[in-house]
Every structure is written in C-alpha cells, then in structure tokens.
Image (cartoon, grey):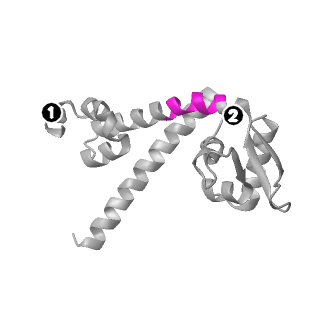
Amino acid sequence: MNDDDMLITQWSSLARVHRRIEACMERHLHRQLGLDVREFYALRTPSEGVRAGTGLLYLNDLANGVGLSQSATSRLVTRLQDRGLITTHASVRDRRSVEIELTAVAHHVLRLGSPILRQAIEEVVRQLGDEETDNDLLRYLCGGAHDNVIAHAHPADSVAAH
C-alpha cells in the first residue's frame, strides 16, 4: 500500500470511529439529559472559545465552534433559549453582535454531561478493543490517564502496552 492509500485508510478508520463515538454520545445525552450532541457542544463552546472565561460568546463564534451555518446556529440558539439554558443580548462592544451567556441550569447540565460523554467514549473504546483496533488509536482516544480502559479492552496486551 502506498503512502497516499495508507493515509486515506487511516483517515477512513478514524472517521468511522468518530461516527461511532458520536452516535453513542448522542444516545446517552438524549436518554439522560434530553440533549443532542450539537446542543451539548454549544453549551461547552463558551468555556472553550476565543473569549474563554468571560462566560460570553458571540453568535458567529458559536457557529464556528459547533460547525453549523449561521441559520442553523440561530435555530440552535432558539432551542437552547426556550429550554432556559442560555440567554442572549446585544453586545456592549458592538451593538450589531449578539452575545450568548450560559444560565445556571446550563452549567449544571455541563457538570452532568461530561461524565456521560466519558462513559460513551469508554463504551465505544471497549467495543473497539474487542474488535482488535489499533492500540495507538485507543490510547489517543482515552488519553494517557485512561490506560485502564485500554487494559480492559485488550487484557492480554495490557502489560505490554504500558
């Protein structure tokens, strides 16, 4: 296999794993919090964005953060507002811009949601381990602090992997 084919094969594998993880996250979030993945990502974006720590986020920053068009982001914002998870107001710096702020309920949802996402990721990683997925990919997905998931996924290889 040439380098181009190898790169495409690896990318396809990573994309498949990503879709599986995101589908599992979607099921867990919907069942336990009534949110979809995009809604949860939208709630996380203010703490991860350009203006992290301010608690505020411009609408176009949110669109970029969750990978949606402006119109889809507007619909998302309306849903989150209707559920009491965010508030919006005109920016004091630029009256043409809309700022988004998380409510106390959203902060509570984020505290509940992070372990749910971790559980979903670990669930899929265990399944992938049973399918003999590349250990390097599994380690990347879990981070170095979660080698116990990899050990559970590949019990025979766990000593050699450390």
Q: Earlier in the sequence, mark 1 or mark 2?
A: 2
Does the image show residue 155? Answer: yes
Does the image show residue 34? Answer: no
Q: Which residue is mark 1?
A: 159
Q: Quarter holding the C terminus?
A: top left
Q: Which residue is mark 2?
A: 106
Q: Which mark is residue 139?
A: none
- Residue appearing at x 50%, y 37% in the figure: 24
How busy is the neighbourhood of tag 1: few (under 14 within 10 Å), some, or many (20 plus)? few
Magenta stretch: give its range.
108-117
Helix, strand or loop for the magenta stretch, by majority: helix
Q: Quadrant of residue 110?
A: top right
- Which residue is the extreme one toward the left? 160
Q: Between residues 88 and 4, which one lies in front from this camera angle?
A: 88
Quick one: SS at disc 1?
Answer: helix
Specify the amino acid type for callout 1: Val
- The image position of residue 88, as x and y in percent, is 81, 47
Up-down relation of residue 151 to residue 60 (above or below): above
- The image position of residue 17, as x and y in percent, is 40, 48
Q: Is residue 114 magenta?
A: yes
How busy is the neighbourhood of tag 2: few (under 14 within 10 Å), some, or many (20 plus)? some
